[in-house]
């Protein structure tokens, strides 16, 4: 994150030492992070409860995310992060987030479960899709319990989705027989040349 032009130039120069292309996003000064999980596939999906991860600085840092609550360097990942569940949101903003989470999940052709992270610019109340965290990055099981889906049921649904996806893939045809490269078949084409 860059707070001024000098930091921005330094960050850009540093990023180009790791990649040929970089993505620069405009800064959100008054930022809230909200996460929501989605379960389903591109045809039918549902959203979980929303959470707000709590952090020590302007944004959720590496230390907040991976070092909080760690003992002897053993990280608990996001399990070590303090959070509010449900996030303190208006009913309208909660539904906007849940709706955008499902639409994003479907648009990306996802299957199974994923946690989608959003940013809210509190100055404008604008909502931004930030990133999607797929398995094994996040089962986000703790976001399903508040909407009545137990861990066991979440796993059962994920297994059913995987079996459905397998059946759909087995029904596809990936090859077919053709004589298109047979020279005798090509000789009868008007003006055909080899």
Image (cartoon, rainbow, N blue to C red):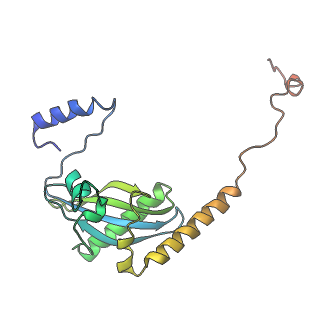
Residue 172 lies left or right of residue 142; in this view the side is right
Residue 67 appears in the rendering: yes
189 vs 3: above or below = above
Give residue 152's position: percent from left, percent from top.
Answer: 48, 77
Quadrant position of the C terminus in the picture: top right
Q: Quadrant of residue 101?
A: bottom left
Name the residue at 13% across, 59% down. 56
Name the residue at 29% across, 61% down. 78
Question: Looking at the image, which is closer to me, 162 or 66?
Answer: 66
Question: Looking at the image, which is closer to me, 13 or 74?
Answer: 74
Give residue 129's position: percent from left, percent from top.
Answer: 32, 56
10 vs 123: above or below = above
Name the residue at 62% across, 65% down. 164
177 vs 132: above or below = above
Residue situated furthest top in the rendering: 194
Give residue 93's position: percent from left, percent from top.
Answer: 27, 70
Name the residue at 22% across, 32% down. 14
Residue situated furthest front in the rendering: 72
Residue 61 appears in the rendering: no
Residue 21 lies left or right of residue 175; in this view the side is left
Q: Quadrant of residue 15?
A: top left
């Amino acid at each position: 994150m860059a707070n001024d032009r000098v930091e921005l130039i330094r960050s850009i120069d540093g990023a180009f030492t790791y990649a040929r292309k970089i993505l620069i996003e405009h800064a959100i000064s008054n930022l809230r992070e909200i996460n929501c999980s989605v379960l389903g596939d591109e045809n039918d999906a549902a959203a979980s409860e929303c959470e707000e991860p709590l952090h020590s600085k302007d944004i959720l840092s590496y230390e907040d995310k991976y070092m909080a609550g760690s003992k002897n360097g053993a990280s608990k990942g996001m399990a070590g992060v303090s959070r509010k569940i449900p996030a303190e949101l208006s009913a309208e903003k909660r539904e906007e987030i849940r709706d955008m989470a499902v639409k994003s999940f479907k648009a990306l052709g996802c299957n199974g479960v994923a946690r989608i992270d959003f940013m809210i610019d509190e100055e404008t109340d604008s909502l931004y899709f930030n990133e999607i965290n797929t398995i094994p990055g996040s089962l986000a099981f703790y976001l399903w319990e508040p909407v009545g889906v137990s861990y066991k049921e979440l796993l059962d649904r994920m297994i059913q989705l995987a079996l459905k996806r397998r059946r759909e893939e087995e029904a596809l045809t990936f090859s077919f027989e053709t004589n298109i490269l047979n020279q005798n078949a090509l000789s009868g084409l008007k003006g055909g040349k080899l």
